[in-house]
Image (cartoon, helix red, strand yellow):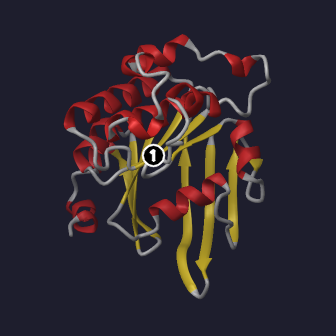
Amino acid sequence: MLDVQQVDQFYGSSHTLRGISLTVKRGECLALLGRNGVGKTTLLKCLMGVQSIASGSIRFEDADISKLAPHARAKMGMAYVPQGREIFARLTVEENILMGMATKSSSEARNIQEDIFDLFPVLRTMLARRGGDLSGGQQQQLAIARALVAQPKLIIFDEPTEGIQPSIIKDIGRVINLLRNRGDIAILLCEQYFDFARELADRFVVLSRGEVVASGDRSEMDSEEVKRHLSV
Protein backbone atom coordinates (compact mmCIF):
# COMPACT_ATOMS: atom_id res chain seq x y z
CA MET A 1 0.00 0.00 0.00
CA LEU A 2 2.78 2.44 0.98
CA ASP A 3 6.39 2.06 -0.14
CA VAL A 4 8.99 4.60 1.02
CA GLN A 5 12.51 4.26 -0.37
CA GLN A 6 15.66 6.18 0.60
CA VAL A 7 13.90 9.41 1.55
CA ASP A 8 16.07 12.38 2.53
CA GLN A 9 14.77 15.71 3.83
CA PHE A 10 16.43 18.92 4.97
CA TYR A 11 15.46 21.92 7.09
CA GLY A 12 17.96 24.48 5.81
CA SER A 13 21.35 22.91 6.36
CA SER A 14 19.98 20.37 8.87
CA HIS A 15 19.72 16.85 7.43
CA THR A 16 16.52 15.72 9.20
CA LEU A 17 15.70 12.47 7.38
CA ARG A 18 18.50 10.22 6.17
CA GLY A 19 17.72 7.45 3.70
CA ILE A 20 14.41 6.41 5.29
CA SER A 21 12.85 3.25 3.84
CA LEU A 22 9.72 1.47 5.06
CA THR A 23 6.62 -0.28 3.76
CA VAL A 24 3.07 -0.56 5.08
CA LYS A 25 0.87 -3.35 3.77
CA ARG A 26 -2.90 -3.53 3.52
CA GLY A 27 -4.40 -5.06 6.66
CA GLU A 28 -1.44 -4.41 8.94
CA CYS A 29 -0.31 -1.84 11.49
CA LEU A 30 3.26 -0.56 11.32
CA ALA A 31 4.46 1.22 14.48
CA LEU A 32 6.88 4.11 14.02
CA LEU A 33 8.86 4.52 17.24
CA GLY A 34 11.54 6.85 18.54
CA ARG A 35 12.32 9.55 21.07
CA ASN A 36 11.18 13.16 20.66
CA GLY A 37 12.98 15.07 17.94
CA VAL A 38 14.23 12.12 15.88
CA GLY A 39 12.17 12.98 12.78
CA LYS A 40 8.96 10.99 13.20
CA THR A 41 6.51 13.84 12.61
CA THR A 42 8.69 15.24 9.82
CA LEU A 43 8.50 11.87 8.07
CA LEU A 44 4.71 11.75 8.40
CA LYS A 45 4.39 15.25 6.96
CA CYS A 46 6.58 14.20 4.05
CA LEU A 47 4.35 11.19 3.43
CA MET A 48 1.31 13.48 3.26
CA GLY A 49 3.05 16.09 1.11
CA VAL A 50 3.00 18.82 3.76
CA GLN A 51 6.82 18.79 3.66
CA SER A 52 8.77 18.16 0.46
CA ILE A 53 11.53 15.56 0.22
CA ALA A 54 15.00 16.20 -1.20
CA SER A 55 15.49 12.73 -2.68
CA GLY A 56 14.08 9.22 -2.62
CA SER A 57 10.57 8.08 -3.51
CA ILE A 58 7.15 7.69 -1.91
CA ARG A 59 4.81 5.28 -3.68
CA PHE A 60 1.15 4.66 -2.85
CA GLU A 61 -0.55 1.67 -4.48
CA ASP A 62 2.47 1.53 -6.81
CA ALA A 63 2.00 5.14 -8.01
CA ASP A 64 4.82 7.63 -7.38
CA ILE A 65 3.31 10.40 -5.24
CA SER A 66 6.61 12.02 -4.22
CA LYS A 67 5.66 15.37 -5.76
CA LEU A 68 1.87 15.30 -5.31
CA ALA A 69 0.11 17.98 -3.25
CA PRO A 70 -1.52 16.93 0.05
CA HIS A 71 -5.08 17.20 -1.30
CA ALA A 72 -4.19 14.90 -4.20
CA ARG A 73 -2.79 12.30 -1.81
CA ALA A 74 -5.94 12.56 0.31
CA LYS A 75 -8.08 12.01 -2.77
CA MET A 76 -6.12 8.84 -3.56
CA GLY A 77 -7.02 7.42 -0.14
CA MET A 78 -4.46 8.67 2.38
CA ALA A 79 -5.70 10.11 5.70
CA TYR A 80 -3.76 11.82 8.49
CA VAL A 81 -4.58 12.27 12.17
CA PRO A 82 -2.05 14.93 13.19
CA GLN A 83 -0.27 15.34 16.49
CA GLY A 84 -2.23 17.79 18.63
CA ARG A 85 -5.47 16.87 16.83
CA GLU A 86 -5.79 20.19 14.94
CA ILE A 87 -9.56 20.18 14.87
CA PHE A 88 -11.41 23.36 13.87
CA ALA A 89 -12.23 24.88 17.25
CA ARG A 90 -14.98 27.25 16.04
CA LEU A 91 -16.75 24.68 13.86
CA THR A 92 -19.26 22.23 15.29
CA VAL A 93 -18.47 18.55 15.69
CA GLU A 94 -20.66 17.80 12.66
CA GLU A 95 -18.90 20.44 10.56
CA ASN A 96 -15.50 19.09 11.59
CA ILE A 97 -16.46 15.58 10.52
CA LEU A 98 -17.88 16.81 7.21
CA MET A 99 -14.57 18.57 6.51
CA GLY A 100 -13.04 15.10 6.28
CA MET A 101 -15.27 14.39 3.29
CA ALA A 102 -13.88 17.26 1.21
CA THR A 103 -12.43 14.82 -1.33
CA LYS A 104 -15.82 13.20 -1.94
CA SER A 105 -18.45 14.26 -4.45
CA SER A 106 -21.08 16.75 -3.24
CA SER A 107 -23.73 14.03 -2.97
CA GLU A 108 -21.46 11.74 -0.93
CA ALA A 109 -20.29 14.55 1.37
CA ARG A 110 -23.70 15.40 2.79
CA ASN A 111 -24.16 12.45 5.12
CA ILE A 112 -21.88 11.03 7.79
CA GLN A 113 -21.66 7.24 7.68
CA GLU A 114 -23.44 5.63 10.60
CA ASP A 115 -20.51 3.37 11.45
CA ILE A 116 -18.52 6.44 12.56
CA PHE A 117 -20.91 6.81 15.49
CA ASP A 118 -20.68 3.08 16.18
CA LEU A 119 -16.94 3.62 16.69
CA PHE A 120 -17.32 6.86 18.69
CA PRO A 121 -20.85 6.97 20.22
CA VAL A 122 -20.07 10.13 22.23
CA LEU A 123 -19.78 12.18 19.03
CA ARG A 124 -23.41 11.50 18.11
CA THR A 125 -24.55 13.41 21.19
CA MET A 126 -22.23 16.35 20.50
CA LEU A 127 -22.86 17.13 16.82
CA ALA A 128 -23.98 20.71 17.52
CA ARG A 129 -21.21 21.47 20.02
CA ARG A 130 -18.19 23.47 18.92
CA GLY A 131 -14.98 21.47 18.56
CA GLY A 132 -13.10 23.80 20.88
CA ASP A 133 -15.51 23.01 23.72
CA LEU A 134 -14.64 19.29 23.74
CA SER A 135 -12.15 17.67 26.09
CA GLY A 136 -8.77 16.60 24.73
CA GLY A 137 -9.88 12.98 24.50
CA GLN A 138 -13.11 13.90 22.71
CA GLN A 139 -11.15 16.07 20.28
CA GLN A 140 -8.88 13.14 19.51
CA GLN A 141 -11.89 10.95 18.76
CA LEU A 142 -13.22 13.73 16.54
CA ALA A 143 -9.90 13.98 14.67
CA ILE A 144 -9.95 10.23 14.01
CA ALA A 145 -13.60 10.34 12.91
CA ARG A 146 -12.78 13.22 10.53
CA ALA A 147 -10.07 11.05 8.92
CA LEU A 148 -12.22 7.92 8.72
CA VAL A 149 -15.21 9.50 6.94
CA ALA A 150 -12.97 9.85 3.88
CA GLN A 151 -12.92 6.02 3.83
CA PRO A 152 -9.13 5.92 3.46
CA LYS A 153 -6.98 3.05 2.25
CA LEU A 154 -4.12 4.22 4.49
CA ILE A 155 -4.49 6.08 7.78
CA ILE A 156 -1.56 7.73 9.55
CA PHE A 157 -1.73 8.42 13.30
CA ASP A 158 0.74 10.85 14.87
CA GLU A 159 0.89 10.09 18.62
CA PRO A 160 -2.86 9.63 19.18
CA THR A 161 -2.43 8.94 22.92
CA GLU A 162 -0.55 12.17 23.70
CA GLY A 163 -2.22 13.98 26.61
CA ILE A 164 -5.24 11.66 26.59
CA GLN A 165 -6.90 10.11 29.62
CA PRO A 166 -6.56 6.30 30.00
CA SER A 167 -10.22 5.52 29.26
CA ILE A 168 -10.03 7.30 25.89
CA ILE A 169 -6.69 5.63 25.12
CA LYS A 170 -8.48 2.28 25.46
CA ASP A 171 -11.21 3.46 23.07
CA ILE A 172 -8.64 4.63 20.51
CA GLY A 173 -6.79 1.31 20.78
CA ARG A 174 -10.05 -0.57 20.27
CA VAL A 175 -10.81 1.41 17.12
CA ILE A 176 -7.31 0.95 15.65
CA ASN A 177 -7.54 -2.78 16.36
CA LEU A 178 -10.94 -2.97 14.64
CA LEU A 179 -9.55 -1.18 11.60
CA ARG A 180 -6.58 -3.53 11.43
CA ASN A 181 -8.76 -6.62 11.78
CA ARG A 182 -10.98 -5.42 8.93
CA GLY A 183 -8.09 -6.22 6.62
CA ASP A 184 -8.81 -3.53 4.01
CA ILE A 185 -6.82 -0.62 5.41
CA ALA A 186 -3.13 0.03 6.08
CA ILE A 187 -2.19 1.74 9.36
CA LEU A 188 0.94 3.70 10.20
CA LEU A 189 1.02 4.42 13.93
CA CYS A 190 3.58 6.91 15.25
CA GLU A 191 3.61 6.47 19.02
CA GLN A 192 5.76 7.09 22.10
CA TYR A 193 3.59 5.01 24.42
CA PHE A 194 5.46 1.73 23.89
CA ASP A 195 2.90 -0.66 25.43
CA PHE A 196 0.11 0.84 23.32
CA ALA A 197 2.12 0.42 20.12
CA ARG A 198 3.22 -3.11 20.99
CA GLU A 199 -0.38 -4.26 21.48
CA LEU A 200 -1.43 -3.03 18.04
CA ALA A 201 1.60 -3.34 15.78
CA ASP A 202 2.31 -6.17 13.37
CA ARG A 203 5.73 -4.70 12.58
CA PHE A 204 7.80 -1.77 13.82
CA VAL A 205 10.42 0.73 12.70
CA VAL A 206 12.60 2.74 15.12
CA LEU A 207 14.05 6.13 14.15
CA SER A 208 17.05 7.82 15.74
CA ARG A 209 18.60 11.05 14.45
CA GLY A 210 16.59 10.80 11.24
CA GLU A 211 17.65 7.24 10.42
CA VAL A 212 16.07 3.81 10.70
CA VAL A 213 18.10 2.06 13.41
CA ALA A 214 15.89 -0.99 14.06
CA SER A 215 12.94 -2.78 12.49
CA GLY A 216 11.19 -6.10 12.73
CA ASP A 217 8.08 -8.00 13.74
CA ARG A 218 6.13 -7.36 16.93
CA SER A 219 7.82 -10.33 18.61
CA GLU A 220 11.12 -8.41 18.41
CA MET A 221 9.86 -5.14 19.91
CA ASP A 222 10.99 -6.09 23.42
CA SER A 223 14.59 -6.51 22.38
CA GLU A 224 17.31 -4.62 24.22
CA GLU A 225 18.30 -2.85 21.00
CA VAL A 226 14.82 -1.36 20.61
CA LYS A 227 14.54 -0.34 24.26
CA ARG A 228 17.94 1.33 24.09
CA HIS A 229 16.76 3.62 21.29
CA LEU A 230 13.53 4.48 23.11
CA SER A 231 14.85 5.08 26.62
CA VAL A 232 15.40 8.69 27.70
Q: Is residue 197 left or right of residue 148?
A: left
The furthest residue to the bottom? 13
Where is 203 relative to 182, above or below? below
Q: Is residue 165 left or right of residue 87?
A: left
Where is 132 relative to 183, above or below? below
Q: Neighbour class for label 1 at 10 Å: few (<14), some, many (≥20)?
A: many
Kind of residue indicated by mark 1: Arg
User: In which image quadrant can residue 4 be found?
Assistant: bottom right
* Residue behind mark 1: 85
* Residue in the image at 71% along x and 45% along y: 73
* Residue in the image at 22% along x and 61% along y: 227
Q: Is residue 164 left or right of residue 108?
A: left
Of residues 166 and 229, which is closer to you in this image? Answer: 166
Residue 185 in view in this figure: no
* Residue in the image at 61% along x and 54% along y: 47
Residue 51 in view in this figure: yes
Residue 40 placed where, x, y %?
Answer: 45, 61
User: In which image quadrant can residue 50 be found?
Assistant: bottom right
Q: Work out which quarter of the rendered image holds the N terminus and state it.
A: top right
Q: Is residue 114 left or right of residue 57?
A: left
Q: Secondary structure at mark 1?
A: loop
User: In which image quadrant can residue 181 be found?
Assistant: top left
Residue 10 placed where, x, y %?
Answer: 60, 78
Residue 20 placed where, x, y %?
Answer: 55, 65
Q: Work out which quarter of the rendered image holds the C terminus and state it.
A: bottom left
* Residue in the image at 26% along x and 50% along y: 193
Residue 175 placed where, x, y %?
Answer: 39, 26
Of residues 109 and 173, which is closer to you in this image? Answer: 109
